[in-house]
């Protein structure tokens, strides 16, 4: 069996002096004119954007006027764009969103999930409870989908199906922002039961450049993007949770950056002050790989103060620890990856 | 940034019609004469064997007579070779092993760890307890190390240090079995605080061919290997736990196969009836990758009954499910990997 050509090693995991494991990946950075200013790896191969495009999936809710009709505030809009950790505030907020739409947890079709943190798991266990669908990391997004369905006058049951008006609206938005046609033959079912369509990383990066700058959008859509952007950067805890990448980075950069992770190693971002969108995927789907890649890109591109530099460094170079806390190694960007980023972006 | 040459894609993760994520890796199968009969990927690159060689690390305990002196039974010897899930029987057995050596949990230097299964975590939480070092997946191995230290008359404190007689004994065994020199410059600290030395996959596969066949060993060492092999295949639950790969495969094959997983995508095995040792690593460290690779090798090499075929298939082709249980995709060996295995091994 021969060795094969592949995406480059972007992230290394060391132990002692040895590189113990390697993550490969691809990355696109696109400016507001649609020009690719950094291209690493195979950018044509379709990827499922998964949860990384939740903010795009929330656009129909806002531009239709449904978010206003339902009186969703910033925190609730941020929860629409979230892969939250199932902490108390996330669960309560998703419940309130459903109440505002005249619905309940029973209307959610995303399935249940245990919270991410042991503390929150423990709280449920002590109360002798199991988590319902409100605890699903996508419950805010689904509450938004259900709210849109109600305001559109569509049936709420089956809102996760590709043929449902809510999913059709979302598909049209993602096509417009990526500039790519989404087709049934490159469509999978996401973990929360909605369709996820394959797109190129270039298309995804383009979509986030447009989202972050409003370039070429009609005023209503541009305003919807701005409202969602502001909601997320003003309420970053709602987008993820305690100690999570998206929360910590958006908190630290105080409105300068929007970042959103997705399952299987996808990560998207936009930096409006630089007019760029960023999209990447770690080939093997590892979050430790995609987080190190995204933090490395931001570190190369952004001027930072001490606090911002510290937050990025926590994700660019996290230690690999033993169970007694000794630092046995580290996760780090490969030299080749860092050099390519610097050559293209700094 | 250019694309680079790499190990081949061995495992694909699909969603709908698309390959969503890819794992790469390397594999060596070596026969009892030391001849490599299957070589995939870069086999010279040193890898840390981590927990995949716990059975080799237990050899000094047995061949020194310490295991007999401490009256360790099959289940306890199997626990010495285990990465257990921290289930009740594992924790109790590790405690008894320490008692037999006149020691307690406080002598363990491996650090603590929450159990793997939610049921066992819940039991601790309901009892308002946190897990001690007995719950560490390596606690049986460490109990064995401590028992050996006691019987050798060595200090128990510091038994995890590379310079301690226990670790020196283990190093000599691993050098003898792999046929490779273990050096300080390719040495890392394992998650449980003991040294882990870099070796080639060929050396690792050779070590497991020797372990499974006793080829070239003096009678005392050959008997120690046989005793450890029998302990693990007779008590496979002690080696891992509920629904785990190592437990299910060793249960199903009733003594025909020894398999052992390690952190960061390493997996080793021996099939004595075929006189072979197997060692592989998934480049990115993913267990879903290493398990699919090992199950694929066993499926190609072994004659199976229906139950054995079912167990292997559960790991060769596990479904990727949504949170409501819909099968959205699958994990599968790549065609290239399967073809290479069949060409070399069937």
Image: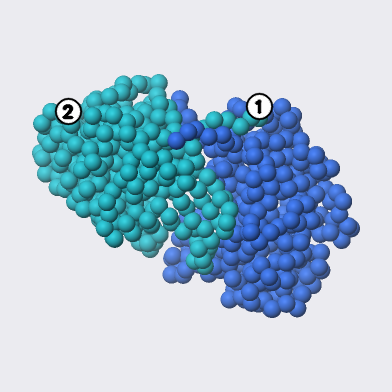
Chain colours: A cyan, B blue
| Rendering coords of residue B203 (x, y %) | 73, 48
Left or right? Give the position of B135 relative to A234.
right
- Per the image, the residue denoted by label 2 is A216
User: Which residue is depicted at the point 45% across and 25% down?
Assistant: B17
User: Which residue is depicted at the point 67% across and 41% down?
Assistant: B43
> As rendered, which of B218 and A135 lies closer to the eye?
B218
Distance from the alpha carbon under mark 1 to that under mark 2: 50 Å
Could you tell me which secondary element the residue under label 1 belongs to?
helix
Question: Residue B174 sits in which quadrant?
Answer: bottom right
User: Which residue is depicted at the point 23% across and 32% down?
Assistant: A32
Evaluate whether residue A7 shows in this view.
yes
Task: Tell me if residue B159 comes above or below residue A257 in the rendering.
Answer: below
The answer to whether tags 1 and 2 share a subunit is no
Q: Which mark is residue B339?
A: 1
Could you tell me which secondary element the residue under label 2 belongs to?
loop
Q: Residue furthest right?
A: B219
Could you classify mark 2 by the number of other residues whose Cα lies within 10 Å: few (under 14), some (14-19), or many (20 or more)? few
Chain for disc number 2: A
| Rendering coords of residue A110 (x, y %) | 33, 39
User: Which residue is depicted at the point 75% across and 66% down?
Assistant: B169
Task: Tell me if residue A209 comes above or below residue B175 in the rendering.
Answer: above
Left or right? Give the position of A256 relative to A65.
right
Task: Tell me if residue B302 comes above or below residue A78 in the rendering.
Answer: above
């Amino acid at each position: 069996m021969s060795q094969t050509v592949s995406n480059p090693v972007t992230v290394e995991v060391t132990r002692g002096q040895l590189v113990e494991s390697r993550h490969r990946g691809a990355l696109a950075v696109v400016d507001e004119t649609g020009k690719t200013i950094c291209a690493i790896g195979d950018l044509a191969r379709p990827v499922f954007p998964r949860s990384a495009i939740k903010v795009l999936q929330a656009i129909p809710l806002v531009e239709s006027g449904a978010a206003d009709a339902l009186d969703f505030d910033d925190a609730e809009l941020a929860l629409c764009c979230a892969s939250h950790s199932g902490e108390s505030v996330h669960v309560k907020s998703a419940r309130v969103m459903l109440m505002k739409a005249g619905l309940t947890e029973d209307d959610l079709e995303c399935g249940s999930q245990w919270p991410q943190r042991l503390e929150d798991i423990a709280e449920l266990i002590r109360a002798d409870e199991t988590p319902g669908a409100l605890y699903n990391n996508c419950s805010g997004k689904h509450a938004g989908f259900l709210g849109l369905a109600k305001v559109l006058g569509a049936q709420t049951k089956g809102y996760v199906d590709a043929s449902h008006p809510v999913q059709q609206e979302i598909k049209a938005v993602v096509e417009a922002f990526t500039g790519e046609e989404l087709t049934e033959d490159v469509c999978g079912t996401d973990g929360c039961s909605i369709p996820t369509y394959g797109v190129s990383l270039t298309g995804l990066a383009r979509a986030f450049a447009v989202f972050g700058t409003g370039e070429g959008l009609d005023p209503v859509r541009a305003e919807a993007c701005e409202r969602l952007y502001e909601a997320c950067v003003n309420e970053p805890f709602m987008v993820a949770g305690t100690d999570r990448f998206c929360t910590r980075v958006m908190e630290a950069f105080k409105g300068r950056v929007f970042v959103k992770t997705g399952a299987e190693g996808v990560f998207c971002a936009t930096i409006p002050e630089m007019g760029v969108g960023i999209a990447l995927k770690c080939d093997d789907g590892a979050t430790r790989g995609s987080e190190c890649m995204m933090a490395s890109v931001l570190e190369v591109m952004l001027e930072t103060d001490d606090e911002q530099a510290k937050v990025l460094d926590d994700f660019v170079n996290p230690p690999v620890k033993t169970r007694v806390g000794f630092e046995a190694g580290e996760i780090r960007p490969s030299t080749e990856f860092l050099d390519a980023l610097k050559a293209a972006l700094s």
